[in-house]
Amino acid sequence: MTPVFNPSSPQAAPIFTLFVFVLLSCIVILALVAGLVVYACFRYRRRSGEGDPPQRFGSQKLEIAWTVAPFLLLVAIFIFTARAMSNSDPTPADASSPDIVIVGHQWWWEAQYPKGGFRTANEIHLPAGRDMGVLIKTNDVIHDFWVPQLARKVDAIPGYPNYLLLHPDRPGVYLGACSEFCGEEHAWMRFRVLVTSQSEFETWERQQVQIASAPSELLSNEGARLFQEKACMKCHTISGTEAKGEVGPDLTHFLSRHKFAGELLDNTPENVARWLKNPQQIKPGCHMPNMQLTDDQVKSLTAYLDGLQ
Amino acid sequence: MSDIPIPADSLPVAAEIEAENKRSLLSWVASVDHKQIAVMYLLTSLFFFGLGGIEALLMRLQLAWPGMAILSPDGYNQIFTMHGTTMIFLVVVPSLLGLATYLTPLMIGANEMAFPRLNAFSYWLVLFGGLLLYFSFFGGAAPNAGWFSYAPLSEKPYSFQAGLDYWAVSLLAIGVGTVATGLNLIVTIITLRAPGLSLKRVGLFVWMVLVNSFLIILALPALNASLLMLLVDRQLSTHFFTQQGGGSPLLWQHYFWSFGHPEVYIMVLPGFGIISETIPVFSRQPIFGYGFVAASTVAIGLLSLGVWAHHMFAVGMGHRWDMTFGAASMLIAIPTGVKIFNWTATMYGGAIRFTTSMWFAIAFLITFTMGGLSGVMFAAVPIDWQTTDTYFVVAHMHYVLFGGTLFSVFSGLYYWFPKMSGKILSEKLGRWHFWLTFIGFNMTFLIQHVLGLAGMPRRIFTYPALPGWGIMNLISTIGAFVLGISVVVFLWNLYVSFQRGELAGDNPWNAWTLEWATSSPPPLQNFKAVPPVRSRRPLWDLAHPEDPDWKR
Ligand code: HEM
Ligand SMILES: [Cu+2]
Ligand SMILES: [Cu+2]
């Protein structure tokens, strides 16, 4: 339930260990303070008729004790902190040629795989057990890339690209979210990291490089035509077609995604149709306008998108 | 109360108090009396506390369950921005400044602030700023970029509505007013102390106000300057905080937090001062380690100027900077811990009277410690890398600001309300107020630590139905409504006790500092004569000529 306590990488694990150590120290201190306060409340409550007690003004020895003891504890915490920092956030071996470039957009994530020469959105695939250097950038305001089970969070700041090393140890699905307030739909700027074995990852890579399969039926053919005609192509890319827009997510392999619109919706034909009918109603403020499509147009576009394997 | 004997001749006549209390509206607007201005500060912050509280309840309703649609996304963003801005600049700070302007002259045996007109001017600037901020709801749109309005989101291309302009102008007004108050308090404390009242003898509340005022005049100008730059960026298309044109969004973060971190201490030091007055009086013992409590305040003040970048660990400043700021932040925990131990030690060997004021002070010791400890966790940088900008931070800041500052303000109000109004707040309602607050507060915020660790970012208007998220948020929402009820009980207590509360007399708690040497409420001229001051507790000396403090 708490991903911070369930790390799945050699980077997240030391943070978890540090957390447990510091948390336990804090609980001990809290128990000490609360215990002293509660004890005083019982032991020194004023009994009726009691006058003022003898007056005490302080004790130098005690002051020194409760200055020095916390200081020593903090030194210990600091040493563990410094160790955990270098373990949890190592510099990627070759920062100049990242395996993945993550670009934050108001309110979706673009993932470029420069070595494979393709892009996806909101779903990032990684192989298990391998270092992946990630460059984190933004296209507009400040966002923050956070997958608690895999690594620290890192801001995406205009003009200040950041590097992050990802190295998931086991296959699985890891949820992530933008954690810097970035405007109206910040809540739905979620994403997931899908970790598979190296061979499955390579299969996926080969699929992604392929251009979109041409539509086969009448309905989806009509959809493909509408996609070019209705300005969808100004904002979206579908490789192998005229569509080369960069405002919205790459749709070349749209059907391969589990969720869309920043994890707001499951990728089902009904949801895609609802989205196309009026994205502003579903994700108010998002940068895809209501395209005023008729129900028939929605149907054919949905059929087309659902053929993009 | 009745077990503390009150000398009969000091009881004021009821009719006199009524006459005092029925002053005309004009007498308030035109007033330069520090007590009237302070009461206006307190009423203003109470009013905005109501507004900020309603905003909080709206947010909690929206978050009660996944997928609620009480507020639109942008509506939620406006409400959380207004809530944070209101609570910080219009509730916490004005309530502390209100107590400081009321009590500082009284506690140092002075009749006025050093600059009475400047005092009035500061107050009216703060009220004007507050009203202007709320006018934004009618003037187009309320600000919606959060209480720290990070650039470039706060810049024209991403926030083209007028909300952020209102935000910047109103905070500028409040900021200028606050700096003036800081100066005023410093000069008052330095120059107007009664004969014999050296800085080694003033009440700890005055000490904390003094250090606090220095922090104000050092930190707030940074806010004022950056607000001005933001305004110029937005209105005249300069590029201080935008990447295009050579500015930098990080510059805003450095400027803002170089104000913002001292600000969090500006919001708590006077609270420390209150606790340092109420715990001794209700434990019937002098404060344990006066010198250490005062000196640790100075240490906190100095350190707090050098830790701002701990709000920026996720920025990627590099390990060396992260580590430096992490270590500096950890250091602050030491003087803070010293204080907690001294307050606790004050209770030992005492004869504790469990008034509502004392209950709030005791609760403060525990809840503030929790907030301070989660602060230490953030200072261990990798923990911050996980928890920053999640509900864990929301929990931390409410433990320090609500469980810390507001609890201390409640402690102070129950303690000093008799001095201000001549009436004692009902202890029976007070007990209800306290327990509802304590339970509601912990119910709302304790679970938010877990939500943060479960991966819930802050500032989101809704969230997916992940396992446990709904129920944890529901608990938090229910707690918020318990808190809402506690506020209603408090308001009711203020009202009925003011109308027909028990008469207080000059010194209902048998306290020791100078404000209790004048009548309740004090006359326009606070003191006809100040009792001789030969120690930290002049009224103790008067009452115990056989065992005065100055003979120890
Ligand atoms: C032992 C003392 C404390 C330490 C070490 C500490 C440390 C921190 C750190 C490192 C953060 C940044 C967390 C983040 O955003 O990632 C933070 C946030 C915050 N702290 Fe503290 N803190 C302490 C006490 C206090 C006190 C006394 C107050 C105010 C009364 C306070 C108010 C806040 C607030 C309001 C925030 C959130 C700011 C925001 O993001 O909106 N803290 N604290
Ligand atoms: Cu975001
Ligand atoms: Cu801070």
Image (spheres, helix red, strand yellow):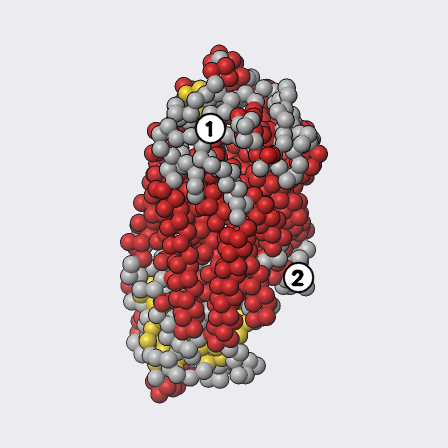
**B201 or A190, which lies in front?**
B201
Which of B427 and A164 lies nearest the eye of the viewer? B427
In which chain is the residue bearing label 1?
B
Q: Is residue B269 left or right of residue B55?
A: right
User: Is residue B207 rendered to the left or right of residue A286?
Assistant: right
> Picture quarter containing residue B320?
bottom right
Q: What's the chain of the residue with tag 2?
A: B
Q: Which residue carries the number 2 mark?
A: B247
Query: Is B466 placed left or right of B104 in the picture?
Result: left
Q: Secondary structure at mark 2?
A: loop
Q: Say the numbered circle drawn on residue B509.
A: 1
Q: For residue B185, say whether it is visible.
A: yes
Q: Given the image, on which type of amino acid does mark 1 rest?
A: Trp
How far apart, in angstroms, are the residues tagged by discs 2 and 1?
57 Å
Q: Position of residue B419 (x, y in %)?
A: 51, 25
Name which quarter of the figure residue A241 lies in. bottom left
Q: In what element is the residue under mark 1?
A: loop
Residue A212, position as x, y percentages in the image: 39, 79
